[in-house]
Image: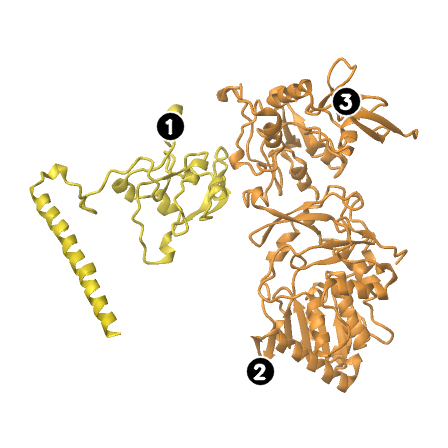
Chain colours: A yellow, B orange
Amino acid sequence: MESKKNIQYKNSIEKFYLAILEGMSITIRHFFKQLVTPKSKLVTIQFPEQRREYSDRYRGGHILNLRTDGSTRCVACMMCPTICPAECITIEATESPDPKIEKRPVKFEIDMLRCVFCGYCVDACPEDAIIMSKQHEMAMYEHSDSIWDIQKLSKRAEIEQFGIGYHPYDPYAKDKKKGIH
Amino acid sequence: MAEDTVTLKINGKEVTTKKGNMILQAAEQAGILIPHFCYHKHLSIAGNCRMCLVEVEGWPKLVISCATMAQEGMVVHTNNEKVRKAVTSVLEFILLNHPVDCPICDQSGECGLQDYYMEYGLHDSRMPLKEKHRKRKVVDLGPTIVLDTERCILCSRCIRFCDEVSKTSELAFIRRGGKMEITSFENRPLDNPYSLNTVEICPVGALTSKDFRFKCRVWFLKTINSVCDHCSTGCNIYAEYHQNKIYRFRPRQTDYVNKTWMCDEGRLSYKALYSRERVETPMLQIKGKLQPSSWNDALDSIHKTVETVISEKGPAGIGVIASPKLSTEELFSLKEFFGNLIKTPNIDFRVDDGFQTNKKMEDDVLRRVDKNPNTLGAMLLKIFPTENGADIKGMISKIDKGDLKMLFLVTDDILKKEDSEKIKHSLEKVEHLILVTPFKSELFKSCEVILPLKTYMEKDGTFINAQGRIQKFHRVINPPHEAASLVEIINGLLQMREHQIDLSSIEKVFLRMGSQHLFFEGITFEGIPDIGIQLKIGEV
């Protein structure tokens, strides 16, 4: 038994400690290399102070668009909860005071912990009411915080910071055409 | 060949049909579906939508099949290129001024326009959006209906329904051509007792039900065959639900009972299930306080009460008040246990005067005066007091005298009687009051045991309607927590007495019913078709 332990000990010296030194030498080599390379050619990004440019198709936290008068563009047609593979969208509809709009949501909730960020809801929306942002930092302390309601989805202060993500159409294109915007 | 039939060829298929039938009806017999909007099986023929065009060989033009009689030797084509081209053009005209607001339209998912567009249309609109006729939207047409004149395709089904079935004639067309629309005279409300049928037969989203409007998209709904429990007519229905909640009832076609119609009260009767708070677990009165208990404890307490009352006063000390809202099997098991086994003479179901008005019609369409679904079932099973037994009135006076020690009360329907205050006062005096009810009740304070009952949407069973048809309904939603049907409760009590009678499944109940009553002989629950069976009962 003892001899076996000795063999294991010798092996570990070769395998681990030598390997660590070898690894450290690479790190240290790069450390000195970095010191002499010009700043523009560096690969490391100083996250979170510094961020990579994301694609315009990035699928982050959702945004509910508003009409120019401030009411929500959503007409509660239920296309997004129908297509949603994670069943994370809950909508309750009601009569809109404007007979031309007819239907509006009283409740629009997305459970961000269930959401798989597939973007199908954006594709399904006939009103371009739901689009996505580039926000991906959504850690929360309470489960109840993961359910984003209609207020949170429409007034997204984070958009300024992160920018708009996946949106196949310009949500205001229709309005621009009609000359509303 | 019989004289009153004609034989014709539709799409190469020989069809023999009754003389006087239209081509569309003959095709329907043969399983060939011809697209149509204005034709409806139980309404007169209008022939104004022009969707059902077919080609008859040797005839110069295409004809509308809903208004062309089938004739001997006709050769009809319903799906060749000429017909399809014509139908596509008709559809394009119908859709010309349609707003195409499917995302917010309640009909989408079950809309004739959507279905036929996918089959015949698939065209882009040639009408510029700005030039489409704009008409009135979200018109309040009455207490139950909202009208959208833009979506209307002017098939006149709703007008004909109000003229011919409800005979109230509220609706009519006004204006002409592209500006034509449906309206009620001087905007008087469309408020006849069958008004929601117009929503049902509307092939598009022009008429929408205020009750169902925006509650749920139709493609989420699942459907189960059932029977309406609102009156003794027993209309066949589809109960539609989503996530354990019922959203609407729709009539199911049966030529024997309700054709394709249903009254508004019945259609909205699903709301009664959600109108009162439910009892969720059995409850026992312990030291003057109602406390939730297990089923075993509750049944054991009833069992002991029955034993003590019988030893003190004999079976006459027990009274049973059933309800004509129970299913046939439940009434039977109640009668088996209390009538045949314990032999109490005091058993009655007549909480209202439904047993007298069972067959009486409220109008000449569907509604009956008796608002209980199973009065005839209770009468056939003889849920009446036997000799020396007391009916409900007798039981109440017996309670006042102190002769009735135990009352087994199923549902608190008895409080609907006019002298409910007096009855309530009397019931407080019963030593052992056992209440089996789905809903929380004002009688709770005076109860010894409370058992939660399933409503009829939560169990399988049958009702016998006023015509003597036995019709079955199925479980649609799950009951709250521990609610049970009366068959299950009685079966539990039977097991406590270690008795031979086995009522553990609905088929066993039917087997036993068949052995005791001639008209149930040979009937099994599985064997009853969806449209029910006429029982051979003669005059009751």
Identified by mark 3, the residue type is Val
Q: Is residue B58 left or right of residue A150?
A: right
Q: Secondary structure at mark 3?
A: strand
Question: Do marks 3 and 1 both belong to one polypeptide chain?
Answer: no
Q: Are marks 2 and 3 in contact (CB under 8 Å)?
A: no
Q: Which chain letter goes with mark 2?
A: B
- Label 3 Cα crowd, 10 Å radius (few <14 / some 14-19 / many 20+): many
Which quarter shows the C terminus of chain A?
top left
Q: Is residue B2 above or below residue B144?
A: above
Q: Is residue A178 left or right of residue B171?
A: left
Q: Nearer the viewer, mark 2 or mark 3?
A: 3
- Label 2 Cα crowd, 10 Å radius (few <14 / some 14-19 / many 20+): few
- Whole-Å distance between the Cαs marked 2 and 3? 81 Å
Which of marks 3 and 2 precedes in the sequence? 3
Residue under label 1 = A173
Residue under label 2 = B287
Q: Nearer the viewer, mark 1 or mark 2?
A: 1
Identified by mark 2, the residue type is Lys
Q: Is residue B442 left or right of residue B359?
A: left
Tell me residue B262's x, y (percent): 71, 45
Q: Is residue B513 above or below residue B467?
A: below
Q: Is residue B323 left or right of residue B85?
A: right
Residue under label 3 = B76
The residue sitting at the left extreme is A36
